[in-house]
Amino acid sequence: DNVALRAEARLSSAVERVKGGFSADTPEAGDLLGSAIAEVAQQGVDAAFLDAARNSLANWQESRLKRARQDLELAMRYLDEDYLKDSLELARIAGIDEESIELATRLLTRLRMVDEVNKMMDKTMEDPALPPLEAAIQTAHSHFFVEEEMDMLWSGSLQARLRFWTQEIQGAVQVHEAAGLDVVVAKAQKLLERSQEALDIFKSKTGNNKVPDVAIRTLERDMRGLQLVLPGGRDLSNVAWATANIERVLGAVERYAEELPEVIAAAEAQVPKGLNEELVEEAKECQKDYAMTIEELEKEISAPFCDGEDLKASLIRARLAGAPMELIERGFGKLEKKFPEWFSYTKTELELLVAKQEADDIQELSAEGRFLRLQDAADAARMLQPRLEKSIIEEVEDISMALAAERSFVMAVKEAKDILGGLPMSPEDVSLSALRLGHAIQACEMSAQEEAKKGIGEAEELRVLLEEEGERRQEVLQNAIAISAERG
């Protein structure tokens, strides 16, 4: 009928317009065909003709998608802002994948902001202050700029790190704070190396790729700033490391005597930079004792005839000086063979003397371990006949008292940290814990060894926090009781 004929005519016209695929001159052709298909589908048009129209629409949509993909790739390649904007609009309509849309959208944002970001970077790189430069870098990142694609941002990011580490090292040197400085110095050195590599790349670029002078000049300036403070930071770090190392060995020479030559050499190199020379002299004396006692014991072991008391004394001196355990075992082997009556006595006495000497090895052994070891050794030594010198026993008792104070102190501090970390406990028990910590602090101040007293400051802070925690838990408990009473 006439209605069907008119519908076919409109559909034929719409199909004709999409022949040849998508055209930027008639971007609406596919939409018109889609509307025509929907309109005539219910008007008795031949099914074969309708299927052909649908195929034409599918082909047109495919060609539009292909064109959109090509345009988007070209626009992103040539960084044309207007072209990219139009291509993005077509890409969204054509149904290009979201990942490609996202990449193109970020690029368009960067193109719109590139001049502004460059101006910000220029201004803040000239200004030696760190906060404005950090703010400019954050703005650049928030608009999808990345260092790998923008030399000004690359230079600015390096400068921000250079300024940061310069301030960190300078501040540490001024207050002589060496904790963690070795790591900082290593990071700063690597940053300087990366900055030099970037600088070489910047200087090699020419023509349209030439890097702005400000990015090169200010980067060189900030590199010089870090290079100026780095030696002072390195010296402070090296002195602190060598000091800690030699103190570690001196604090447990019976265990680390073999390391003396190495730590002495390292420490001597740092004396001109500020290391305490007395530590080196003390270590050298220990090294002399070490060598002398080893030689002494070797002679006693190798001598065909020797005195039992002399061998015993040499064994004790060598062990306390840190002689190798293999040599000590050889000495005990001879003592057991030649003077069996001295063997057990010497073993027990030496165990007490070593436990006494290691009683201050706070960095090496726990307070609990040092306390129990000294107690066990002292109990065994009290059974010896003939008895040990009274002065040794009295000194051991004083050290035991100091270790007991340190042990209680350590346990009270641990309990406080557990409670503040959320350990379930009633308000009353929290208050009792704060009281115990206070008593432990007092005992530590009166009796503990000097190294243990270094933790008193932190313990005082914990005690205050514990008291506040007890009050807080009491308030929570009272509120809960009140709410429960209201509910009946």
Image (cartoon, helix red, strand yellow):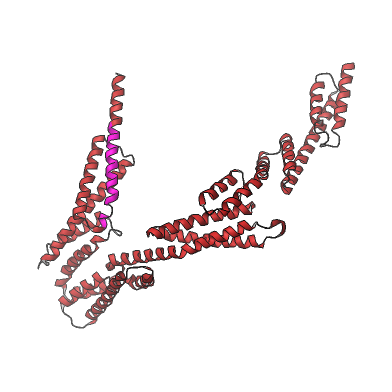
In this rendering, the answer to whether 420 lies above or below 311 is above
The C terminus: image quadrant: top left
- 64 drawn magenta: no
Visible residue check, residue 16 = yes
Question: Nearest the camera: 78 or 16?
Answer: 78
Q: Main secondary structure of the magenta part?
A: helix
Q: Return the x and y of residue 433 as percentages of the image width and height.
A: 24, 41
Residue depicted at x 73% and y 38%: 91
Quarter of the view holding residue 283: bottom left
Tell me if residue 266 can be seen: no
Q: Which residues are magenta?
A: 451-474
- Give the x, y percent position of residue 337: 19, 75
Q: Quadrant of residue 21?
A: top right
**Residue 309 drawn above or below residue 426:** below
Q: Position of residue 226 (x, y in %)?
A: 50, 61
- Residue situated furthest bottom in the rendering: 304
Residue 38 shown left or right of residue 326 in the figure: right
Q: Residue at x 87, y 17 (%)?
A: 3
Q: The N terminus appears in which quarter of the rendering?
A: top right
Tell me if residue 39 comes above or below residue 67 in the rendering: above
The residue positioned 30% from the left and 27% from the top of the image is 479
Q: Is residue 96 left or right of residue 433?
A: right
Give the camera-side residue of 17 and 437: 437
For residue 261, side relative to residue 69 (left or right): left
Residue 113 lies left or right of residue 364; in this view the side is: right
Q: Is residue 456 magenta?
A: yes
Percent coordinates x, y for residue 486 in the rendering: 30, 19
